[in-house]
Amino acid sequence: MAIVTPMKTPAETSLEGAFARLRDTLPGAAAERRAAFARYAERGLPHRRVEEWKYTDLRAALRDAAPLAERPAAVPAGAPDLGAPRFLIANGHVLSAPASLPAGVTAVSLREALTAGHPALSALGDPLAAGNAAVELNTAFMTDGIILTVESGVTVTEPLHLAFVNEGSQPFATAARVLVMVGGGASVTLLETHQGPAGVAYQPNTMVEIVAGDGARVDHARLNGEGDAAIVLSSLSLRLGRETELTSVNGVFGAALSRHQVFATFAGESAKASINGLALLSRTQHADSTLVVDHAEPGGESRELFRTVVDDEAAGVFQGKIIVRQKAQKTDGRMMSGALLLGEASAMYNKPELEIFADDVACAHGATCGALDEDLLFYLMARGLPKPEAEALLLQAFVGEVVETVSNEAMREVLTGRIESWLKARAAR
Amino acid sequence: MIEIRNLVVEIEGQRILDGLNLTVKDGEVAAIMGPNGSGKSTLSYVVAGREDYEVLDGEVLLNGENILEMAPDERAAAGVFLAFQYPLEIPGVGTMTFLKAAMNAQRRHRGEPELATADFMKRVNNAAEGLGISKDMLKRALNVGFSGGEKKRMEILQMALLQPAFCILDETDSGLDIDALKIVADGVNALRSPDRSFLVITHYQRLLNHIVPDTVHVMAKGRIVKSGGKELALELEANGYADYRNLAA
């Protein structure tokens, strides 16, 4: 009898070798790491015949798996200053934490927690993301990160900044993990920035988990400002208690290939979440936004607004799935993805999905793709705006609608600045 | 002065303008009247530089310079202004942002320095006041949620700020009630000057009671078929266009 062994790619072989070598030296959670790696290894790296990865063929993109980065000796420069207490996570290792934290907020490094044990660790891991290759690999390899706890009832006025900085001249991989436990009725703003060197095909794989207690309020915004050759995986897990309100916005500018996955579970009644994103893509960039929104309890409200601008031969992907469980009556879900294609060879793949098992719900989704409106361009040009300027104004307005959903002003400015430089670079070409 | 000479224009193989000739002198207000489909709006778009049209022959000279090869923004900087029949709504683009971008783009084009914010604000506020444009309207996205009358007033505001040499008003009266019509007409009349000329396109005599033209031209089948003084508009109002449809054939 012939034994069929699926052929492993060099990247898959490297990942196996790396895990075998490192599993006893990585901090703690040995059993969880092994289980996660085994779940990953069942199917290997996902490729285009795996439905959830149809438009982002990770197996083809990841020629080889780069070695896991060591903790950098020096503090890399260049993380943006958002005027907020900042955690610096370099190449997947926590380099610094704010000297003092706002009242009601505590933080411990994940490495420390995994080594010494920590009560919050039981919350690590999202069942909705089980079997997802990026998530399982992050769990298998997680090097360090932060466990942040916001006490119940505390309103944290200062935003907290998680600055992920990558540095290196040769390809490397990172696996940082952040867990944020927001107590009932507490309120907090989280800002994430990601950056790294240009021209280096480094491979960050980060995961942020936010567990929001009943009545909590969380504003989250994220900037992907990674280097132009990076292959970036990021996962965001959101677990919402009763009557929580959460917003999350992701702005994509960097990376050769990026996939940002959001797993949102409405675990309590009447929770509200708005999950938005914008992306400005050029050259041969590929950016994937994949969402799974699981309404498990009644009365939830979810809103998704994604805006993608695709130039040159770049490609954008939006996959959004809303699940409404039988119990989740009176769910109100609306998902919208819009794309502007600027180049002849620009591409956008939109895949909205609804899985509804309850009968009293309001769910809608929509997807649009198109060129810039010629009538609007003519109107602006007839008032004296040169074509590049007229286009820039319309593009800025298009993605600006998403920027406006970011509550933090400093982050809005950072995103607006990135948009402006992208548009300037485009006009100069 | 604008001179249109033997302008022949097609769109998708269909001839819309068929050897049109028209001269509007400095300081002159010329009205063009004509039945639906005579090519009035096409004329305005072709002069402003819209791309969908194929110009087969002719010239459009603005102060002796043929503008037909220019992009719409270059024509604007040279002094052409089209007040749109249906001004467009531009979500996400603030009215003030747009006004400033337009004014500064034209200034840059002419080699003039950009306006200081205070100077810009003063100009906008002065012009807006005369047109009954509220501060709230100026704060909103351009034309978004504006009524028909508000949109037309916003067009005239732009005209006042950009100070063009040649203004085309494409059915600016359409969709306006009598009060709004008067505000718009007063705005236009305030801009009349010896070195600025206007082309007022309209179906109806009514607008011309408020913006009194120096000359009136009847357009049919892509040509000017009759020209005269302001009394020609009254004659058209009384008799309709029937006589002229045949003239063009």
Image: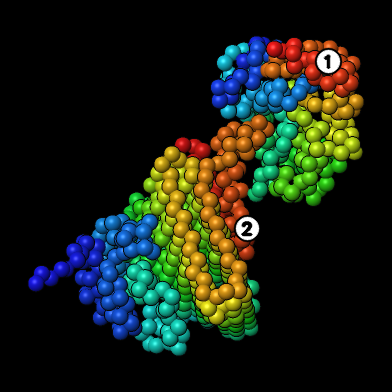
**Residue on which disc 2 sits:** A404
Task: Tell me the quarter of the picture where residue A95 sits.
Answer: bottom left
Q: Is residue B74 left or right of residue A284?
A: right
| Residue A247 picture location, percent across and down | 58, 68
Residue at 33% from the left image edge and 63% from the top image edge: A50
Q: Quadrant of residue A226?
A: bottom left
In the picture of the structure, the residue carrying the numbered disc 1 is B215
Question: What amino acid is found at the position of numbered circle 2 in the picture?
Answer: Glu
Vertical relation: A137 (above or below) B134: below
Look at 87% across and 39% down and name the residue there.
B177
Q: Nearer the viewer, residue A194 or B61?
A: B61
Identified at 43% across, 39% down, the residue is: A344
Mark 2 nearby-residue class (10 Å; few <14, some 14–19, many ≥20) = few
Identify the subunit bearing mark 2.
A
Pinpoint residue A145: horizontal percent, then vertical percent. Answer: 42, 74
Q: Which mark is residue A51?
A: none
When the figure is inspected, residue A56 is found, relative to residue B66, above or below; the finding is: below
Of the pair A151 and A36, the residue shown nearer to us = A36
Query: Can residue B45 be spotted in the picture?
Result: yes
Amino acid on which disc 1 is placed:
Thr
SS of the residue under disc 2: loop
Residue B189, how many percent across, how many down? 86, 27
SS label for mark 1: strand
Q: Is residue A197 above or below residue B87?
A: below
Q: Mark 2 to mark 1: distance in Å? A: 51 Å
Q: Is residue A142 among what the camera can see? A: no
Image spot of residue A316 (x, y percent)? 44, 52
**Residue B30 placement, left or right of A97:** right
